[in-house]
Structures are given as C-alpha cells and as structure tokens.
Image: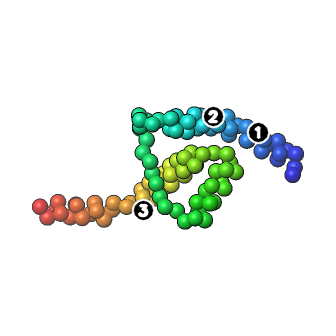
Amino acid sequence: MEKNNRFNQFIQHKSLAFKFDEGGSLLLDSAIEQDKRGDLPLKNVCAKLHVSLSDRLDKTVNTLSISKREFIEYAIIEALDRTDQIMEEVDVTEFLREQHEAKEAQS
C-alpha cells in the first residue's frame, strides 16, 4: 500500500470518527436501554429476516463496532430518501391527479 494512501485513509478515518462522534451513538443506545417507562419518542420496528441476511448484518455491525440500531437507522433513512427521490422522478401520483382532474371536469 502506498504511504500517501495510508495517510489519507488514516486522516479520513479520524475525520469521519470526529464527524459522527462515536460516543454520541453509544449514549443514545444507553439512554434507549435505560428508558424503561418509554419516555423517549421512539417506536420499535421489527421484521423477520432470512438467517443469512441477519448473520450478514451481525457480521457487518460487529466488524464496524456499531449498534444494529444505528446501522438500521442510517439504512432506513437512506432508503427512504432514495425512495422519495424516485417517486418524485416518476411522478408517482400522476394518474391519481389526472383521475381527480377528470372527475372535477365532469362536475
């Protein structure tokens, strides 16, 4: 590995660690764990997954030393943002809008 590349990777690692404040997510995970009365505005989202996908998730979060909650939260946000963008690009409500306009024209 080229020395310059190693330096860049090291600086990138440290910069991202600072940006995402590794301790911040641990504090939130701890607060969630201690919230026995349900005071935090959170909702549990569960899904049955194939064993191989669950194992892959476990391996990934363990390798990266992050919680499943944190990984899944980022993944859902990314998926929803992409979904919103695609729905806007294909104009998902186009036909509903046209039907509504046609009904209004008939009235």
Crowd tier of the residue under label 1, counting other residues whose Cα lies within 10 Å: few below 14, some 14–19, many 20 or above: few
Please provide percent x and percent y for residue 53.
59, 63
Which mark identifies residue 90? 3
- Horizontal placement of 82 versus 4: left or right? left
Which mark identifies residue 50? none
Give me the residue at 24% from left, 64% from top: 99
State the residue in front, 27 or 88. 27
Dividing the image into 4 quarters, which one contains the C terminus?
Answer: bottom left
* Badge 3 or badge 1: first in the primary sequence: 1
Amino acid type assigned to the residue bearing label 3 in the image: Val
Q: Which residue is mark 2?
A: 23
Give me the residue at 42% from left, 56% from top: 88
Nearer the camera: disc 2 or disc 3: 2
- Regarding mark 2 in the picture, which secondary structure is present there? helix
Crowd tier of the residue under label 2, counting other residues whose Cα lies within 10 Å: few below 14, some 14–19, many 20 or above: few
Q: Which residue is mark 1?
A: 11
